[in-house]
């Protein structure tokens, strides 16, 4: 099984090359945090802060959607 980890500073997935968190990583996180959506949001918020420093060229709303929006929209 591929790890689907974040490769910095581009924030691409080491397993599939898609923007991280990729669909596979999102699915795994959804399973791991199925009982605690708030904990998942806190976990991903830490990554969002790191990604914002590395991906300064991307708009904040795009980063928000990528790291947190999918959880809030019901991706878990």
Image (spheres, rainbow, N blue to C red):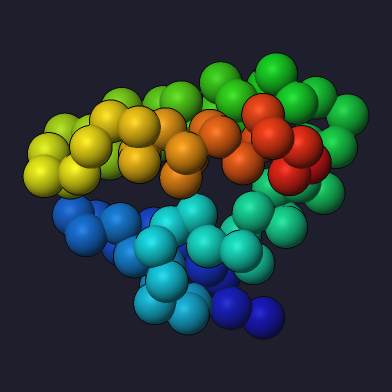
The quadrant holding residue 51 is top left
On screen, 15 above or below 46?
below
Position of 2 compared to 74: left or right? left
Query: In this figure, what is the number of numbered marks?
Result: 0
Inspect this view and state whether residue 50 appears: no
Position of 27 compared to 3: left or right? right
Residue in the picture at 34% in, 65% down = 12
Q: Position of residue 46 (x, y in %)?
A: 41, 27
Q: Quadrant of the N terminus?
A: bottom right
Inspect this view and state whether residue 1 appears: yes
Residue in the picture at 50% in, 54% down = 21
Q: Position of residue 42 (x, y in %)?
A: 56, 21
Q: Position of residue 58 (x, y in %)?
A: 20, 44
Q: Position of residue 72 (x, y in %)?
A: 67, 29
Front one among 14 and 64: 64
Residue in the picture at 47% in, 79% down = 16
Front one among 76 and 28: 76
Residue positioned most to the left: 57
Q: Quadrant of the C terminus?
A: top right
The quadrant holding residue 64 is top left
On screen, 52 above or below 66?
above
On screen, 64 above or below 31?
above
Position of 11 compared to 75: left or right? left
């Amino acid at each position: 099984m591929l790890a689907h980890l974040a490769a910095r500073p581009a924030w691409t997935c080491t397993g599939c090359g898609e923007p991280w968190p990729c669909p596979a990583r999102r699915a795994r996180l959804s399973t791991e945090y199925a009982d605690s959506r708030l904990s998942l949001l806190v976990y991903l918020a830490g990554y969002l802060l790191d990604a914002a420093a590395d991906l300064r060229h991307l708009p904040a709303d795009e980063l928000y959607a990528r790291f947190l929006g999918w959880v809030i929209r019901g991706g878990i």
